[in-house]
Image: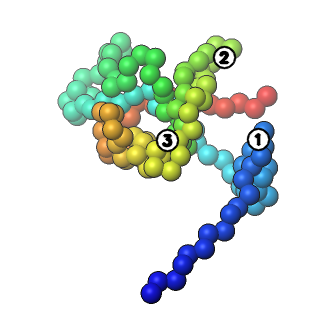
Amino acid sequence: MADAIEYEQFGGATPGQTRAQADPDLRRLSDIPMELSVELGRTRMTVGETLDLRVGSVITLDSAAGEPAGLLVNGTAIARGEVIVVDERYGLRVTEILEGNDIACSPGTGGSSAGETAPATGDARDAAAVEIAASES
């Protein structure tokens, strides 16, 4: 007969407290740099179509205008949001944090969620992404 599994409850962050503040071990990771990018959409092109690109060429992406853009950390989608302009720079207002299965199924990680037409390769060459340069003030 199988032994019962006991789960330990870990204290979560209180309202207004970040996960790093709630767990002192995560603070040790706070200075590690990560690459953040915002993915507006994707498309597939043949090598010939790519070689034919010129200044002024228009590439149509699979996302509709106004559809949430994906926030990727080191190539993995972790959130979605709306693209905004702040002081003549692009930014992203986060509207949804992806969790668990949503992250595993997001286009930035090679999976595909229901209703999404993004290619399932997760290859950066398939993605049209806008890099967001974060400058500390």
Q: Residues within 10 Å of mark 2 (few under 14, many from 20)?
A: few
Instruction: Find the distance from the CA under tag 2 to the CA under tag 1.
Output: 27 Å
Q: Is residue 53 left or right of residue 130?
A: left
Q: Residue furthest bottom?
A: 1
Looking at the rendered image, the disc whose residue lies closer to the viewer, 1 or 3, is: 1
Asked if residue 114 is positioned above or below residue 49 in the image, the reply reads below
Q: Which residue is mark 2?
A: 86
Identify the residue shown where x is 69% and y is 51%: 32
Earlier in the chain: of badge 2 and badge 3, it is: 3
132 or 19, nearer to the observer: 19
Instruction: Find the distance from the CA under tag 2 to the CA under tag 3.
Output: 22 Å
- The part of the image, by quadrant, that contains residue 117 is top left
Q: Which mark is residue 77?
A: 3
Whether residues under marks 1 and 3 lie with C-beta atoms below 8 angstroms apart, the answer is: no
Q: Is residue 75 visible?
A: no
What percent of the width, then of the height, locates residue 5? Answer: 55, 75
Q: Is residue 10 left or right of residue 78?
A: right
Identify the residue shown where x is 40% and y is 46%: 105
Looking at the rendered image, the disc whose residue lies closer to the viewer, 2 or 3, is: 3
- Identity, as a three-letter code, of the amino acid under mark 2: Val
What percent of the width, then of the height, locates residue 113? Answer: 36, 40
- Identity, as a three-letter code, of the amino acid under mark 3: Ala
Q: Which residue is mark 1?
A: 15
